[in-house]
Image: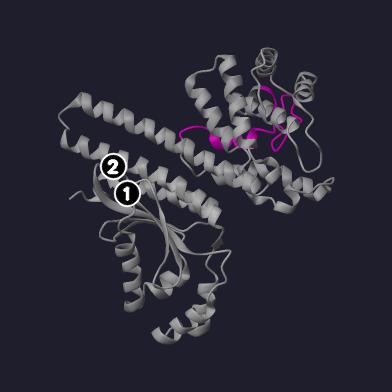
Amino acid sequence: MVALGEVIDVPAVQGLMSDFHTLTGLVVALLDIDGHVLVSAGWQDVCTKFHRVHPETLAHCRESDTMLTQGVPRGEFRAYTCGNGLTDVVTPLFVGDMHVGNIFSGQFLYDDEEPDVTFFERQAERYGFDHDDYVNAAMSVPRFSRETINTFMRFYVGLTEQIAQSGYSNLVLSQRVSELRDAENGLRTTNERLERLLRSITGTMGKVVEARDPYTQGHETGVAKLSVLIAQEMGLSEDEIDTIEIGALVHDIGKLAVPAEILTKPGRLSAVEFDLIKAHPESGYEILKGIDFGRPVAEIALRHHERMDGSGYPGGLAGDDILIAARVVAVADVIEAMASHRPYRAALGLDVAMAEIVGHPEKFDSDVVAACERLYAAGKIEL
């Protein structure tokens, strides 16, 4: 039997899941087939201080971790109510053909269902929990829509497959350590999968931002696609293009720190509100700087509102002090934003957006603008 903890990089997976919990608020755990917790993030007090302390409620947890997860097909997920009255969702993890563990999200309630307060009051009485502390802890668990959970779990299904493939590669490599060529191929495949996983995570980060503002849904993806086109037209290297794409996908992640009512405000912003908006590059940098992308992704988020003449923000950098990736994303960001609808104005269209960047050569990198003009003339920009 394969021991899951021996064939996957547990600290790396812990880091990914901790970052995802920080961004989404979703509780997550990775357990092996025997119910041993290998990775966890965001567990709620009602579970850590009550359910997993009392032996009878702990038995419900173990039943949820093992028995209730059986029979879920590979590549699918199942939602269910655990014996302690909370909602859990599980997707299985395979290495090769062997079911070796499960990825869980749970310890939440659906927002379209009223919490059964009476159930938790009976639990408190039955198991001797402090009534107020226990009920308050139960009522404090996060609440999500079914659509949100389904979206997150589709991401976790993909993540599970990436972990499974990496785990399987590690198993094969450990068994065939003497075969250098196979080992090199296995490592290359793992790196490619991790690169795809990185893109999946950054794409999900962008969608989390967009979900707070229906008027900008698709903005992160649109900016990323246009940024890649511009970078390719400029003849940048594949590594530079990859960096630009990943950075563009999360360039507005700092808007998580901006109140939604300001993001969607239909009228003119006050000076204070605009200052909050202008703080989003720095907020994005703080969110991203602790994640080891192996690329200056956090710097792109920080600098995508800088301008070549020093008139941008937050640092007032100018010229070559602004990294080229941020200069590319800055142009794509302006074009996509102007060509699309916003709560305070109708879409201005691609022609107006192009006129804006061409008409202000002092603000935008001339090579980036020239590449963008060529794409526009060839009809290759689609927004």
Disc 2: which residue: 167
| Marks 2 and 1, how far apart at CA | 10 Å
The location of residue 170, given as percent across then percent down, is 25, 38
The C terminus sits in image quarter: top right
Say what amino acid the circle numbered 1 marks.
Leu
Residue 208 can be seen, yes or no: yes
Q: Residue 190 is drawn in which quadrant?
A: top left
The location of residue 369, given as percent across then percent down, is 69, 18
The location of residue 379, given as percent across then percent down, is 67, 16
Secondary structure under tag 2 reads: helix
Q: Main secondary structure of the magenta part?
A: loop
Look at 45% across and 34% down and name the residue there.
294
**The magenta segment:** 294-319
* CB under 8 Å between discs 2 and 1: yes
Say what amino acid the circle numbered 2 marks.
Gly
Look at 50% across and 52% down and name the residue there.
150
Q: Residues within 10 Å of mark 1 (few under 14, many from 20)?
A: many
Secondary structure under tag 1 reads: strand
Disc 1: which residue: 93
Query: How many numbered dots are placed on residues in this image?
Result: 2
* Residue 165 vertical position relative to residue 237 in the rendered view, above or below: below
